[in-house]
Image: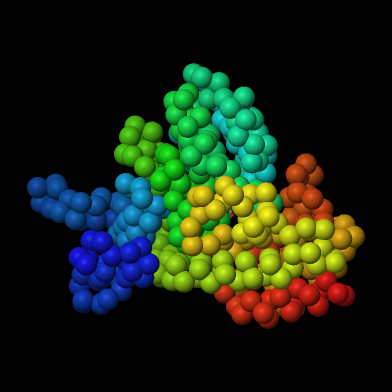
Amino acid sequence: MTKKDVTPQTYTAQGFGMMDGSFKGVIPGIYPSTTYEREVDGSYPSGRVYTRDQNPNYDQPEQVLSKLENGVEAMLFSSGMAAAVTVFQGLKPGDHVIAPKVMYWALRNWMLTFGVDMGLEFSFVENGNISSVKQTVVAGKTKLLWMETPANPTWVADDIAAWSEIAKSVGAILAVDNTVATPVLTRPIEYGADIVMHSATKYLNGHSDVLAGALVTAKDDDFWQRLRKVRNAGGAVLGPFEAWLLMRGMRTLHIRVKQASENALKIASALKGHPDLEAVLYPGLPDDPSHEVSARQMSGGFGGMMSIRVKGGEDAAMKAAARLELFKRATSLGGVESLVEHRASIEGEGTPCPDDLLRLSIGIENADDLIADIEQALKG
Ligand SMILES: *Cc1c(COP(=O)(O)O)cnc(C)c1O
């Protein structure tokens, strides 16, 4: 085996073996300098001019993430929202966008307010319904298909290859929010996606202590160059310390995602058919409506995100959440510690989320401890 064909788990854990150049430290340093010196002839021997999009601390996480996603380049951003919004800023007024009805709520809100103000036109399609995508694309007008799979917080999956075929038939870009599946389980570019987006705040960093975002591209084309300019001009970049912390978190990505997926499957299986639950939403369950599509495009697990619908509606769901002792009642996901959230109340008016739904971000604790906690909380 040469260094070139090592598996993703190995090169991610080692961060491609990049080191600190000055002292042979096995971990690269943090480079806070905002500016770089010119030679007397005016050239920049380091190849860097100014930190806004040239900080050395971006190199390692961008290169590792790009390779993990089977892309050609990656860009880090100050948040997942900044990464996502950059894709929309690459479009022009009048461009038509297709997105799912159920998706990351803050981004959907951005589309409906600032996206519309920018002159973009949006159509929202049913999750898990490919014919509604086919009926909604307009050749010559639809420029972007935005996917999220499995979709937050119902975990309905969509078929990336099928969406890609439709996008290609009208010359539109397919962008996939891969925050929840992570490149450990799904690599959308392998199924025809052009752009992959991450809230690196979640699984990539994995410790609930960095806000960051990323885009990865399948090809270095005009659209990608435009997105590079949007980042540089807009300045929604990551700080060097955050980029360094993100790389530290990413080193353990594979074992974290594997453990969270195993835990979630065990918990979902244990809760399935529970007398106090209306439903357990998890694509890893063999009879889940999204199981077949998910099994086709996810390998190694179905992720750490699941939801439960509690019998007795909103009040019963809120009371069960209040009784949980190991799960922290907090928004966000993808950390090593388990979280619970009543999504309908945080999303507010107009949410498509059922009011009896509790979203669970399953961490890497012992699954039996988590099951016991949920069972005592449901019993009351
Ligand atoms: C958190 C999240 C985002 C937004 O990312 P931030 O880093 O919070 O800006 C986008 N999509 C999904 C699926 C998320 O979970």
Residue at point 51% right, 54% down?
298
- Eyeballing the image, is 28 above or below 357? below
Q: Quadrant of residue 51?
A: bottom left
- Eyeballing the image, is 103 above or below 328? above
**Which quarter shows the N terminus?**
bottom left
Residue 217 visible in the shown view: yes
**Residue 193 image position (x, y, % from top left):** 44, 40
**Which quarter shows the C terminus?**
bottom right
Q: Quadrant of residue 318?
A: bottom right
Depth check: give the residue in front, 13 or 119: 13
> For this view, does 249 lie left or right of residue 23?
right
Residue at point 36% right, 42% down?
218
**Residue 159 image position (x, y, % from top left):** 55, 42
**Residue 157 image position (x, y, % from top left):** 60, 47
> For this view, does 50 lie left or right of residue 303?
left
Residue at point 39% right, 52% down?
69
- Eyeballing the image, is 282 above or below 102? below
Residue at point 46% right, 71% down?
255
In this picture the colour scheme is rainbow
**Extreme residue toward the top, this view:** 140
> Number of callouts in the render?
0
